Amino acid sequence: MSTTHLQSASITTQASVYFDGKCISHSLTMADGSKKSVGVVLAAELTFGTAAPEIMECVAGACEYLLKDASEWASCQPGQSFSVPGQSSFQIRVADAFHYICHYG
């Protein structure tokens, strides 16, 4: 099931805008100190790099993704997620808006 509401978070109100507006997100720090971002990727094919490990949770929409060392694209639908190692990268293909929560660490 997709996360539809997060409680007890400090939110950075200025959005981070990437890839000429194809990805827009806001950073959150949860009460327990964990970091997340919530955002949307618009129709595009993009490559993201990771510093820390990430779990990308699909809240709405859908995407296809290709991890750095993978040979086949996989899909992610609402209620699903995929993990990306730290110090790595992944490609993402989005046909319509992909709404996500990125869980860091």
Image: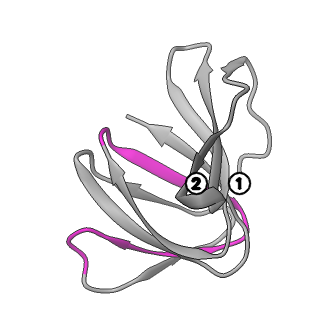
Please state the horizontal and vertical placement of residue 75, each as a whole percent of the image: 52, 78
Q: Number of callouts in the render?
A: 2
Q: Are marks 1 and 2 in contact (CB under 8 Å)?
A: yes
Per the image, the residue denoted by label 2 is 57
Relative to 22, residue 103 above or below:
above
**Does the magenta portion include 103?**
no
Quarter of the image with the C terminus in it: top left
* Tag in front: 1 or 2: 2
Residue 2: mark? 1
What is the magenta range? 51-70
Kindly indicate the quadrant of the structure image that contains residue 41: bottom right
Q: Residue visible at 51% across and 15% down?
A: 33
Relative to 74, residue 33 above or below:
above
Relative to 55, residue 45 above or below:
below
Q: Secondary structure at mark 2?
A: strand
Q: What secondary structure prevails in the magenta region?
A: strand
Identity of the residue furthest to the right in this view: 5
63 left or right, relative to 71? right
Please state the horizontal and vertical placement of residue 88, each as a whole percent of the image: 24, 54
Q: Nearer the viewer, residue 22 or 4?
A: 22
Please state the horizontal and vertical placement of residue 78, each as a whole percent of the image: 69, 66
The amino acid sitting under disc 2 is Glu
